[in-house]
Image (cartoon, grey):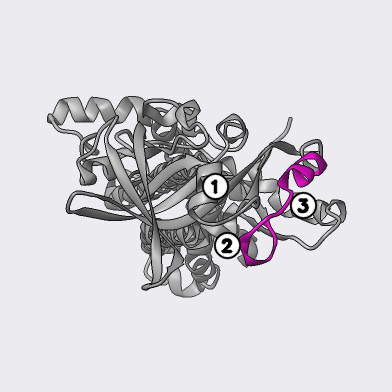
């Protein structure tokens, strides 16, 4: 019959303290709960931050492309030829030309600086989701030479305009006149409003037809860039390397990570700092295990001395107390894992319940673009957190276990 090693049996037995050692049991329970709370908090918070990161990334990339290609001076000639070269390449789902310039919109005494994007409506849907974000009107209303314009909802509100109103676009590319360089001015009719859910776009982006943009910004037959959408946004590095061998002339390529690097680096930094802060909870619980184990060693000195006198080695004594500490840590990690997974996978149910219970919303829709709490569970984060918690528990047991192995049997039994 298979028998467990006596070190394991003793370690498990010591986790169940006698009545006179109830205080040690209480500290052990506190340590276990502390580890469970730390693991639960880490899994839940990182899942929520992953959810926010994915939500914001999707909203940003819903208004722009994964890769932007142009030539020198931010211009691109003969974009149709480049489009035909690239559209059938592996991992490329769509492509569309555009022009991005800065300008000012005015109406009456109201003036707003804007980013003006010139698009081809029949191509734009291949790389961006602007069409699905239209509140009024359609991208197809941007007919060439009609000088129609689509505005973000916040931009329209700040200018106090609605559908059918006329706004004046002032372009920095000036025209030479007898009195000097005069800014180019063109009146546009508002034919649509969109809401992207990002303040940067809703308050500062205006969309016009690419032919109108070529006229206003003096592009001639050129466009600003060709934008590409990939089947996997995280595969941009590999795709850019392959495109370099396909294109037959010098091109400049920028991907979404470079265009929004500061934003995503800030989110990543917040995740790391939050991870460090919440890991301190687990470290505090691990230190509680140290104090618990030291008290257990002190309380069990006579038992340790008896074990040594009947042949137990110092290493066996260490294993007994390491097992006791690991049992406390393992139970805490398992409870924390169960709690963290339960919260992270059901955050869409739990948060509305708490909001209804307390009578207020954490993210009111009239204030925040993201009115619900998103959550994305990343299993690599889960395994990393549980592994770290278990490692900290193991490290916490080493000093008390070593202290136990050095108990002198003669000294411990002198007054017994």
Residue mark closest to the camera, 1 vs 2 = 1
The residue located at (19%, 41%) in the rendering is: 160
Which element carries disc 2, helix, strand or loop?
A: helix
Which disc is residue 318 wearing? 2
Image location of residue 224, percent across then percent down: 60, 54
Image quadrant in which the C terminus is located: bottom left
- Dominant secondary structure of the magenta stretch? helix
The residue located at (31%, 39%) in the rendering is: 369
Which element carries disc 1, helix, strand or loop?
A: helix
Image quadrant in which the N terminus is located: top right
Callout 1 crowding tier (Cα within 10 Å): few <14, some 14–19, many ≥20? some
Q: 247 left or right of 5?
A: right
* Separation of marks 1 and 2 at Cα, in angstroms: 32 Å
Magenta range: 70-85
For marks 2 and 3, the one nearer the N-term is: 3
Image location of residue 334, percent across then percent down: 48, 39
């Amino acid at each position: 019959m298979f028998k467990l090693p006596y070190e394991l049996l003793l370690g498990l037995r010591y986790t169940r303290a006698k009545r006179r050692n109830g205080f040690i049991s209480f500290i052990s329970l506190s340590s276990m709960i502390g580890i469970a709370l730390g693991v639960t908090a880490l899994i839940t918070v990182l899942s929520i931050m992953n959810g926010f990161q994915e939500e914001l990334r999707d909203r940003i990339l819903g208004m722009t492309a994964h890769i932007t290609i142009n030539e020198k001076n931010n211009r691109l000639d003969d974009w149709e030829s480049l489009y035909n070269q690239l559209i059938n390449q592996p991992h490329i789902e769509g492509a569309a030309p555009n022009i991005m310039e800065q300008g000012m919109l005015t109406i009456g005494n109201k003036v707003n600086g804007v980013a003006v994007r010139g698009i081809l409506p029949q191509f734009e849907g291949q790389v961006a989701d602007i069409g699905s974000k239209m509140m009024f009107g359609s991208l197809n209303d941007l007919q060439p030479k009609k000088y129609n314009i689509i505005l973000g909802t916040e931009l329209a509100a700040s200018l106090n305009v609605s559908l059918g109103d006329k706004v004046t676009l002032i372009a920095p590319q000036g025209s030479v006149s007898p009195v000097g360089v005069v800014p180019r001015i063109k009146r546009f009719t508002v034919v649509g409003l969109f809401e992207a859910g990002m303040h940067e776009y809703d308050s500062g982006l205006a969309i016009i037809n690419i032919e109108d943009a070529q006229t206003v910004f003096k592009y001639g037959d050129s466009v600003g860039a060709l934008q590409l959408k990939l089947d996997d946004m995280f595969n941009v590095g590999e795709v850019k390397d392959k495109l370099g061998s396909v294109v037959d002339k010098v091109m400049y390529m920028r991907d979404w990570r470079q265009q929004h690097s500061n934003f995503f680096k800030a989110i990543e930094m917040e995740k790391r700092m939050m991870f460090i802060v919440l890991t301190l909870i687990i470290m505090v619980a691990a230190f509680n295990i140290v104090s618990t184990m030291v008290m257990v060693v002190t309380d069990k000195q006579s038992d340790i001395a008896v074990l040594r006198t009947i042949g137990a080695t110092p290493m066996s004594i260490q294993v007994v107390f390491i097992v006791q500490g690991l049992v406390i840590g393992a139970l805490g990690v398992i409870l924390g894992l169960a709690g963290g997974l339960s919260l992270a996978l059901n955050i869409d149910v739990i948060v509305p319940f708490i909001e209804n219970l307390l009578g207020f919303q954490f993210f009111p829709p009239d204030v925040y673009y993201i009115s619900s709490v998103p959550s994305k569970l990343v299993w690599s984060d889960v395994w990393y957190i549980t592994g770290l918690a278990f490692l900290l528990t193991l490290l916490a047991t080493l000093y008390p276990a070593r202290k136990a192995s050095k108990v002198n049997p003669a000294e411990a039994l002198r007054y017994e």
